[in-house]
Image: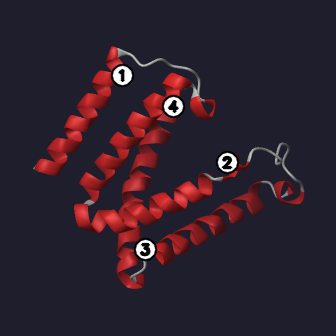
Amino acid sequence: MKEIYYLLAILAGLAVATQTGINSQLNVLTRNPVFTALISFAIGTVALLLYILFTDKSVLMQQPPGMQTQWWKYTGGLLGAFYVTAIVIIAPRLGAATTISIVVASQLIFAVIFDHFGLLGFPLKEVSFTRIAGVILLIAGVYLIRKF
């Protein structure tokens, strides 16, 4: 049953690559990466709202449990806004493959660090030689994609 999660991860990767191109093209029209990101997030917000309206309207009428928590738990949207804006700026200059390969390599490096220290609630998973080798191979892949 884990296969569905692998498929979902692959589809998420497809979505990110596609989003990179779509937002880059939108930026050609707006000529403003922050406005482009705003449009992208506004449309995403409407889509999520429609999903909730058609699946579980009750969630809008109640305060979810645990809404009073540490401030940093609400910063995911800020990080997403930064990511989309940065991609809109970078992708037209470096190309899709280079941009995404650098982003993925960076994600993996920080994910290994987060796992090693159990940061942000991730299960503790110590750094191993195999994980370090994987990161090195991914960085080598970035180099090869960028170089050729």
User: What is the C-alpha distance between the residues marked 2 and 4?
Assistant: 16 Å
Give whichever of 10, 120 is nearer the camera.
120
Left or right of 57: which side holds 144?
left
Callout 2, which amino acid? Answer: Trp
Residue picked out by circle 4: 114
Q: CA distance from mark 2 to mark 3?
A: 25 Å
Could you tell me which residue is drawn at 64 percent across and 66 percent down?
A: 45
Residue at numbered disc 3: 33
The residue that mark 2 highlights is: 72
19 up-or-down from 112: above or below: below
Of pointers 2 and 3, the one earlier in the residue sequence? 3
Tell whether 59 sits left or right of 108.
Answer: right
Instruction: Tell me which numbered mark, 1 or 3, is placed earlier along the sequence.
Output: 3
Whichever of labels 2 and 4 marks the residue nearer the N terminus, that label is: 2
User: Which of disc 3 and disc 4 is earlier in sequence?
Assistant: 3
- Residue denoted by label 1: 131
Indicate the amino acid at tag 1. Arg
Query: Mark 2, residues whose alpha carbon is within 10 Å: few (<14), some, or many (≥20)?
Result: few
The alpha-carbon separation of the residues under discs 4 and 1 comes to: 13 Å
Q: What amino acid is labelled 4 in the image?
A: Phe
**Amino acid type for the residue under numbered disc 3:** Pro
